[in-house]
Structures are given as structure tokens and as C-alpha cells.
Image (cartoon, grey):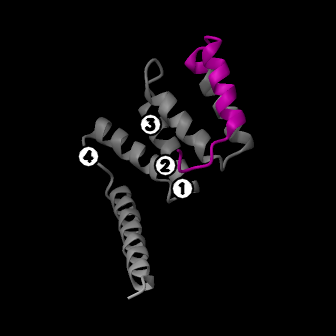
Amino acid sequence: MSEFEMNSSLAEKITKLNEEGVHKEEIERFLDQHLIKYPDDVEAWVRLGVLVFEPPIGDFEKSINCLRKAVEVKPDCLEALLILMRMQNYIYREIDEDLYKLLHKKSKRKSQITFFKRNVKEKKKPG
């Protein structure tokens, strides 16, 4: 299950375009237009970033910018962070230090939450 809420109408439209054999460039234009209307749609930013990364488009710069925008809109979107890190590693053979720190901070926060939940449950057990 996705960390960001799935925009079913967007997913359905993209699926329909793919089934109709529409070229990726046309899907890219559709997503560009969608993002003009809905600039805070994290799912659309991630989908566009992945779409333009892959052949035949292969626009690495746009891909990275789309994923950065997704992280800007929703800094705790783990999917966008992980995809962005993988793409940066593929393109540059390194990962942006700020992105690494943000992801590390998020994983640390989750670990602390898990630790807290575990301790609360243990304290609630009848002794």
C-alpha cells in the first residue's frame, strides 16, 4: 500500500492511456497539465518522475526535479525519498547528503516510535 493516498481517478486515467497504447510523451503531457492544476499532488509528481526517468524519455534532470518536488510537498513521503535516492545513485553514483539526512531522520523517528510503543505495551501488561 502506498504511503501517499492513491488518487484513483489519476491512476485510472494513466492505466487507460497505457492500455490505449498512448506514447509515454503524451502521458507526460497529461501529468504536466494535471500538476498545473494540482501542484500539491505528491502521487502525480512521483509518477511523472518515474515516467520521465525511463526510456524512451530518459530525462534524468526532470525526473530528479519531480521527485524533489514530491519531497518538498510531503517531506515524510518515504516512497519519493527512496526512489529519489536510487535515481541519484544511478545517475551520479552518489546520494545527496541532505536527502540522506532527511531519510535517516525519518527512519530514526520510526524507530523511536516503535521503541515507545513497545515500552508502553510492556508497562500496560498486568504484572
Distance (Cα) linking label 1 and label 2: 6 Å
Q: Residues within 10 Å of mark 1 (few under 14, many from 20)?
A: some
Callout 1: helix, strand or loop?
Answer: helix
Q: Is residue 117 above or below residue 97?
A: below
* Dot 2 or dot 3, earlier in sequence: 3
Q: Which residue is mark 2?
A: 68
Is residue 2 part of the magenta span, yes or no? yes
Q: Which residue is mark 4?
A: 94
Callout 2: helix, strand or loop?
Answer: helix
Q: Nearer the viewer, residue 52 or 6?
A: 6
The residue sitting at 56% across, 56% down in the picture is: 74
Contact check, label 2 and label 3, Cβ < 8 Å: no
Would you identify the image quadrant in which residue 125 lies? bottom left
What residue type is disc 3 on?
Glu
Which of pointers 3 and 1 indicates the residue nearer the eye?
Answer: 1
Q: Which residue is mark 3?
A: 61
Q: Is residue 32 above or below residue 57?
A: below
Residue found at the very far right of the displayed protein: 37
Q: Position of residue 36 (x, y in %)?
A: 71, 40
Residue found at the very far front of the displayed protein: 127
The residue sitting at 53% across, 50% down in the picture is: 3
* Dot 3 or dot 1, earlier in sequence: 3
Distance (Cα) linking label 4 and label 3: 15 Å
Which of pointers 2 and 3 indicates the residue nearer the eye?
Answer: 2
Give the residues in magenta: 1-25
Q: Which residue is mark 1?
A: 72
* Dot 4 or dot 3, earlier in sequence: 3
What residue type is disc 2 on?
Arg
Distance (Cα) linking label 3 and label 1: 16 Å
